[in-house]
Image (cartoon, helix red, strand yellow):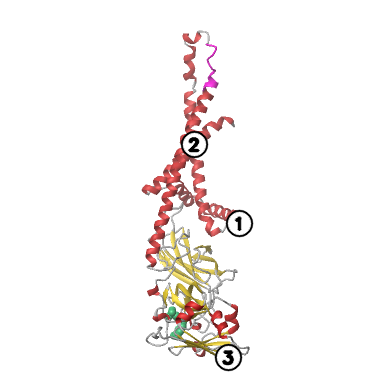
Amino acid sequence: MKKFAFPLLTGALFAAPLIALNYLAARLFDWPFGPYALFNWMVRVLPGGLITFGIDAMIDTLRLLGFSVAEAAKTAERGMAVLLFFTALTLSGALLTLLVSGLQSRPGGSRRSTTPEAARPAEPAAPRRAEVQSLSRRQFLITLGAASAVITVIGSGVGAALARAEQRRREEEYLAEIGQTNVQLPNLNDPVVPAPGTRPEYTPLQDHYKVFLNTEPTVIDGQNYRLPITGLVDNPLSLSLDDIRSNYTSFDQFVTLSCISGRIATSLISTTQWTGVSLQDVLADAGPQPAAKYLYIESGDGFYETIPLDLIQSDPRIMLCYAWDGRDLPVDHGYPLRVWIPDRYGMKQPKWITRMELISEDRDGYWVERGWSKTAQVRTTSVIDTVAVEAVDESGPRPTIPIGGIAWAGDRQISQVEVRVDGGEWQPARLRTPLSETTWVVWRFDWPFTAGQHTFEVRCAEGDGTPQIEERNPTRPDGATGIHRVEAEV
Ligand SMILES: Nc1nc2c(c(=O)[nH]1)N[C@H]1C(S)=C(S)[C@@H](COP(=O)(O)O)O[C@H]1N2
Ligand SMILES: [Mo]
């Protein structure tokens, strides 16, 4: 056993800096990275059953260790590739060392000691051959170890710094792509970078979808604006825009809004930041009477809706909103005031509000009267935005094609997104930390691809694990359900 320690150590001390230098060169000059190349090649030539077994074993181990599989799988795969390559290099190095030292200690090498000079009495202080060898071996190992450590640390350190710089560049690119915003996005450092072609996570304001009854948006004069709050209240109010902005605590909320009339993968869905005050605070000032059970809201364009008072009083997030994306509400989106109710489709959320009245009897809203859902609760959905065939990613052990999109469950959050190719196994996608608990989640799946024509499907589960409804349902009356499917040629 001891016989192999020296060659193995020598092999390892050569292997580590070689891999580090290779990593650096891969970052600097786009060289292939040996560990990934080897891994990739093995995956291709080894029998499929063995690969599946290996991947399953890895996933089971990750689960056992309590890792999120989707997040950790790629890191584990990379680690395995490096370890494998390191082992292979170390063994090759050890073999080479054995061969070289074998050559040096061949009998021919020591025959000289039988020449006449050697017949002289041995100098007593001369160390025996084995000692010389172990001394110089130790010297050799120390020197090699030091050099190896220095090169490994510097090579992998600089390589990692370059990789981080690349990540930062991508972030900046991402910010440039989503356009100008006054708003600080909380998740710019998220490691899950959207697949190229994924819609912007934060919708540029001018691209936010628009829906209104009339042919033109309604224009309201904000300067002379007053919001009357009347009906079953002790203290009827008439609030100016300034009253609302300065007399109540305002807050911001990243919000995804969608129209109930959108089909699966609709473009009638967008995300921006909403600013306003809690509707329950404002109503408290009006002093609702015990008989008051509903809030009736009327808009400048003839639209109207009713919200149960107990819903408003139980959910402080329900917002009387005066700003989007850090500026006054755009005219198209309801200037000067609109309402936000979490987890409801847009049809329950009036824009261009002109008056509010507390009433005792329920009254159906504009679209409810026309056959749409009474509650209009958001139905969980997931969408494939892109199969980025032009963006093959060779930075990992196996070349992959990024697939990406969004998933949204109103305010119920998304715990899992899965992708399936050609009706095969459902595989977990990685989830980007969303802007808030009420926005869509951007997901990404790096697919180790095969060429040809393929079908891609996506499904998701809510925060508590409830799966999205896979069965197809039309938009009317409750909102569409079903699995989004796309075809792509790779
Ligand atoms: N006053 C008024 N509010 C309204 C509507 C409307 O036509 N008039 N449309 C509703 C519907 S159906 C939707 S989907 C959302 C759309 O809001 P957006 O145009 O700001 O995206 O507004 C809702 N609020
Ligand atoms: Mo809508």
Mark 3: secondary structure: loop
Q: Earlier in the sequence, mark 1 or mark 2?
A: 2
State the image coordinates of residue 451 (x, y, percent, origin top left): 41, 60
Name the amino acid type tagged 3.
Answer: Leu
Q: How many marks?
A: 3
Residue at point 43% right, 55% down?
A: 399
Q: Which image quarter holds the N terminus?
A: top right
Q: Residues within 10 Å of mark 3 (few under 14, many from 20)?
A: many
Name the amino acid type tagged 2.
Answer: Leu
Q: Which residues are magenta?
A: 123-132
Residue 389 appears in the picture as rendered: no
Mark 1: secondary structure: loop
Q: Earlier in the sequence, mark 2 or mark 3?
A: 2
Name the amino acid type tagged 1.
Answer: Gly
Residue 380 appears in the picture as rendered: yes
Q: Height in image: 124 above or below 156?
A: above
State the image coordinates of residue 180 (x, y, percent, origin top left): 37, 68
- Does mark 1's beta carbon lie closer than 8 Å to ligand 1? no
> Which residue bears the numbered disc 3?
232
